[in-house]
Every structure is written in C-alpha cells, then in structure tokens.
Amino acid sequence: MKTSSAPGKPRAKAILISFEVPIREEFIMISMQGRNAVVFGVANKRSIAWAIAQRLSEAGAKLAITYQNERLKQEAHDMIVGLQGAEAFQCDVTKDSEIESLFATLKERFGHLDTLVHSIAYAPAEDMKADFLNTSREGFKMAHDISVYSLIALARAATPLMNNGGSIMTLTYFGAEKVMPSYNVMGVAKAALEASVRYLAHSLGPKQIRVNAISAGPIKTLAARGVAGFTEMLKAQADRAPLKRNVDVKEVADAALFLASGLSTGITGETIYVDGGYNIMGY
C-alpha cells in the first residue's frame, strides 16, 4: 500500500528506536564537587548528622564539621579522618560569640558556603521523662534555645556566605504534629522548629536560599536513648508504616544530599518525610 505526500515534499518517516540500558548508580550520582557544606550535630558515628556528612563528602563536597566544646575536640578530629578535605571546628550554638567566630573562619577558609545542616536538639532528661504538665520553665527555655533558636542564629550567620544561594536543612520528627509518648517538650520544640523553617524560607527566599526540614522516622541513635519507650516506637513504626519497616540513617542522608543539590532548587519551606510513609497513616 502506497502513502501519498504533497508534490515536491519529501515523505516523512517515523523511526522508533528502543534502548535497553541498565540503570546504574554512576548514571544518577549527584555531584557536590566545588561546593562547601557545614554540618552541626555530629555526636558519634551512629548519628544522623554523621551519615549526612559522609554522604555529602562522598558526593564531593568540602566539609566543615562542628563540635560543641574542647572535651569533644579529639573525638571529632578522629571521626573526620576518612572524609577527604574535611575540617573540624568548635562551636557551641548557645553562644553568639562562637557562632560569629566560626563563620568568620569559614569565610576565610572556604570563601563561600552552599549547604548548612542543622541536626541539633536537646531537652533535659527530667523534662523528657516527666508528665508534660510538669515541664519546667528552665527546661522549656533550654529545649527551645538549643533545638530551635540555634537554627535561626546559624541561618543568619550563614546568609552572607551564601551569596550565590544555598540550602539550609534541619532534622525534625513526627512528634511535632502528633503526640508521641515520652517525647513531651521536645515535640513542642520540634513544632516550633518546623514553623521556623517556614518563616526562614520566606525571609531567605529572595536570596535564593532554601530552607527545609527532614522528618525522619525513629532511628537508633545516641539521642534516641533519651526517649522512654523508644523500642516500642520502633516496633509501632515498622508495624504501621506502608513500607512495613524502619528507615535507616543512609536513607535520611540520601534525602539530605538531594536537598543540598541543584535538583531541589524549587523546594523550600517544606518538611520532607523519610519515615517509610508512617505519617500518612490514620491509625
């Protein structure tokens, strides 16, 4: 059967080419080459912040890792030995003078900053374990100062170094939205943290600086030991989440790498859940 075409015009041909190329990790690797990041909250090698630091380093980022005080200095330096080009700096986020000093040093060493990871949270043990009604005034102030205000203070200090835009992220938990037994004042602090993310996103948006939160499912970390009934929380998560399992630090770190990269330039003010879908369930 012949097909007709307009006189003097070449006949159009449709050619369908099928490629069967296996998807390999090398093809989808996110590169952070030429980018600088500072990570706050690396407590030990089981911490979420450490997993994020490793992931950013693997992707090629130059890292600054902070430690709280002189007592933790050696441990921090020992941890970063395997991270190429990483440096450790002291910074107690409750002291404005140390924050100012750190970012002056980062400006001198790095020139600019592309990513800031805030993985800091603290509340007195007695206020975590007691009935929420009995939360102390001092415990409430401390939880919000360390867990929430520190994000604002660090974002303010980082902004002048993010002159080409950048990504700021923090770590939160579902206890900010729903009552989780024994999470108490930390749940209230996380709610304030998530609200701060939205307000910071609005403040920093004109500078093309993105601010987001990652809401991770319960993970066995040193900090998690302070939550009574944590083992039961892990079991409930695995039973009810659509994926029927708990998440691990590497999955959270992958989400952090995405938020740090150029693939997330249209995302800000959001809480990204890495919890196996637990947050969508109604029971």
Image (tube, helix red, strand yellow):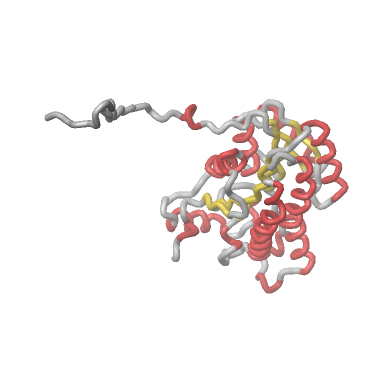
Residue 196 visible? The answer is: yes
- Name the side, left or right, on which 183 lies relative to 10: right
User: From the viewer's perspective, is residue 202 above or below residue 83?
Assistant: below
Q: Nearer the viewer, residue 62 or 270?
A: 270
Residue at the far right: name it: 97
Residue 211, x across and y down, in percent = 65, 50
- Name the side, left or right, on which 215 lies relative to 157: left
> Toward which corner of the image does residue 260 lie, by quadrant?
top right
Residue at (66% x, 70% y) in the render? 132
Residue 175, x across and y down, in percent = 59, 61
Residue at the far bottom: name it: 133
Residue at (66% x, 44% y) in the render? 167
Please state, as top left, top right, bottom left or bottom right, where the N terminus lies in the image.
top left
Residue at the far front: name it: 7
Residue at (22% x, 31% y) in the render? 5
Residue 43 visible? The answer is: no
Residue 172, x across and y down, in percent = 62, 54
Please state, as top left, top right, bottom left or bottom right, where the C terminus lies in the image.
bottom left
Q: Nearer the viewer, residue 104 or 237?
A: 104
Residue 266, x across and y down, in percent = 58, 47
